[in-house]
Image (tube, grey):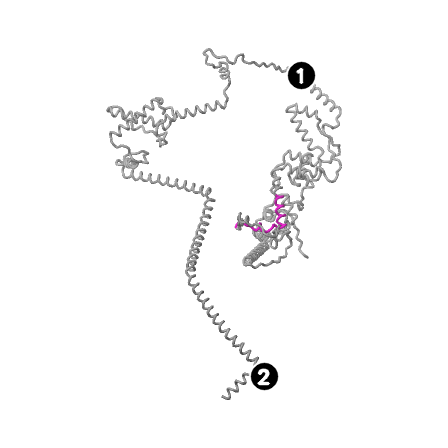
Amino acid sequence: MPRINIKGGVWRNSEDEILKAAVMKYGKNQWARIASLLHRKSAKQCKARWYEWLDPSIKKTEWSREEDEKLVHMAKLMPTQWRTIAPVVGRTATQCLERYEFLIDKAQMRDEGGDDDPRRLRPGEIDPCPENKPAQPDAIDMDEDELEMLSEARARLANTQGKKAKRKAREKQLEEARRLASLQKRRELRAAGIFTRVHRVSKKKFPINYNEETPFEKQPPVGFHDVSGEDAVAPKARDFKTLQLADIERKSFREKEQEARQKDKERAEKRKTEDLPGLLAQRTSAFTEPAVKRSKLVLPSPQLEESEIRQAAKLGAHARDLAEESARTGLTAGIGETPRTELRTPATSVGGAGGTAAAADAADQLASLKDQLANLPKPKNDFELMEPEDEAEADATGNGVDLDAEESEAAIKEDQADADRRREEERRRAEAEAWARRSEPVRRGLPVPSECNTSVLRRPDGLLELQRAEELVKAEALKMIKYDIRPKDPAAALAEQFDQAELAQAAELLEAEKRAVAEGMQHGRLTAEAYCKVWDECLAQVLYLPQQGRYTRANLASKKERIESLDNALNANRNHMNLEARQAAKLERKLKVLLGGYQARAKTLAKQLAEGQEALDQAAIELETYERLRQHELGAIASRLESLEDDVQRQCRRESELQTEYDRLRLRLDALRLARREEAAAAEAGAPSASDTAATAGSAS
């Protein structure tokens, strides 16, 4: 008995991954090919699994109230048509059906999955629709069939180009090479003056064969015509470097059809992303006007009248509770059975006495509102425009300034933008003035110490006048340094505030003092080299102690302190080098990103320039070779002409000699012919011929 293989059952994680990879490779139209990778699933089951669960466009989030209302409304309009309802709601058909059944159970206060629920699976039963359920985890010890399926699927999906595709590509390349070789051969034969005709069997017939005839050829008129204007404009040479195969051959019908389909697909994708409401309207238009006329829809009557809705809106918090209760009853009312009442809107529904009373209340409210509006005071449009009596009024001083105009301008409130601009200018001016009051090192951007060393000051007791002056200078310098370190600190602020005139006078005094010192020491203006030399000498006399965090004289430091100082300087230099190296590497990366294309282009151009230079050198060598060959040929022309002239003269003499010999032989031939004719005549007459007479005379002698 043959083995029966039944495909189906629950889906596992490995099967889902194989299905997703196969859809990415083969697309959504080759389900039989995709199902060949899964031994336990058919093509129909693979397609259902993709469109019901694995498709990334499937929405699996919680249902919102708007979606529930739309689902219930569409279920009333089109009962049991879940495939049509699904695109409108934005869910799958199975999700819509399960949600609708859940709402029905909730409205009927019935537990989902009870003992009497026919949808619940009994022990031993098989799920008829496992495609819309989550996948189960794979077993740890998979059987051999599953392992073989996984290895085969991995091998087939990893092979991006099969044997058939490779063979087709190879055949296409060979055909292209054969065609180009034939074309090159015909071009070479045509250049040599040999014209051949190629008989090709083509399925398509072009209207004009460019290889055999000239399109739109015009026969020239008979007779002479002026050709002076033909050389006026030189014909432009055709650039064969930019010539492509598409410029020579036409596209096939299949390629054109494929391009058109690709454009339609891109247009549909663009519309899906940009014009989603229009696309939904186009999809929903399929069931708004059905081709087959259906029976009249019957919906239940509304639960609330229009007047009741207006009253509920005015009640506040109670109105909100009432609206929620009515909405809930309106959604779930009549879900369990098919409604059979007449479809009516709230404005046209048949009402009893309650409807008449509500309409009367609405009319009374409208009348009271009109009365209240009528009791409002009427607007007073009592505006008065006044003109100045005399525009030429001047003030008592006679300067021609209008005081009323000044008062009106003063009364006008300043615009906020102008006020902000004015305050910004004042702030900038104040900052510029404060910056001008700062010390010279701060304005020039020189390094400023982080702490102020007050230990350099000495007590004034027992000091001389010159030493006291030095201490005063030190105290003033420390005060300025403290202000430079923390200018906003009230404790460090300068007590005296100097104006610009005093600061300018102080600067002039300093300049005069510098000139006096320079003239007194007779050193003049120092060069950069001399300044650096003095700076290095002064720096060599000072040593920084990292353990104590201060500077000291080099001659007072011990050997250990010198080693520590040099070690600290070496580490500082290394850190500085590492920082500079990182910054340089970062700049190199940025330059590589910014100038990578230019560098590649520069390399290509340099290569082209080198090739061009090489070709130019080769052409120069060939030119020089042919030039020397020309000179040799010009030198050999005289000897060749002389030898040729000698040959011609020799041939002429030989020809004249041969002509003379030819004349002599021709005369002899004529004499012989004459003698022969005479002998013949003598023989006929019976007399001895001249020859016989000569012979007889010879014998007698």
Disc 1 crowd, CA 10 A, few/some/many (<14, 14-19, 20+): few
Q: Amino acid at mark 1?
A: Ala
Residue 273 x/y as whole percent = 60, 39
Q: Quadrant of residue 186?
A: bottom right
Of 650 and 2, the residue lying toward us: 650
Residue 494 x/y as whole percent = 35, 23
Q: Residue at x 37, y 31 (%)?
A: 445
Q: Is residue 11 left or right of residue 671?
A: right
Asked if the stretch drawn in magenta spans residue 247, the answer is yes
Q: Quadrant of residue 378?
A: top right
Residue 40 x/y as whole percent = 63, 50
Which residue was labeled with disc 2? 683
Of 181 and 225, the residue lying toward us: 225
Residue 489 x/y as whole percent = 38, 25
Q: Amino acid at mark 2?
A: Ala
Asked if the stretch drawn in magenta spans residue 21, the answer is no
Disc 2 crowd, CA 10 A, few/some/many (<14, 14-19, 20+): few
For residue 374, the mark is: 1
Q: Residue at x 39, y 40 (%)?
A: 580
Of 264 and 575, the residue lying toward us: 264
Q: Secondary structure at mark 2?
A: helix
Q: Is residue 215 visible?
A: no
Q: Which residues are magenta?
A: 241-265
Determine whether 259 is above or below 422 in the image. below
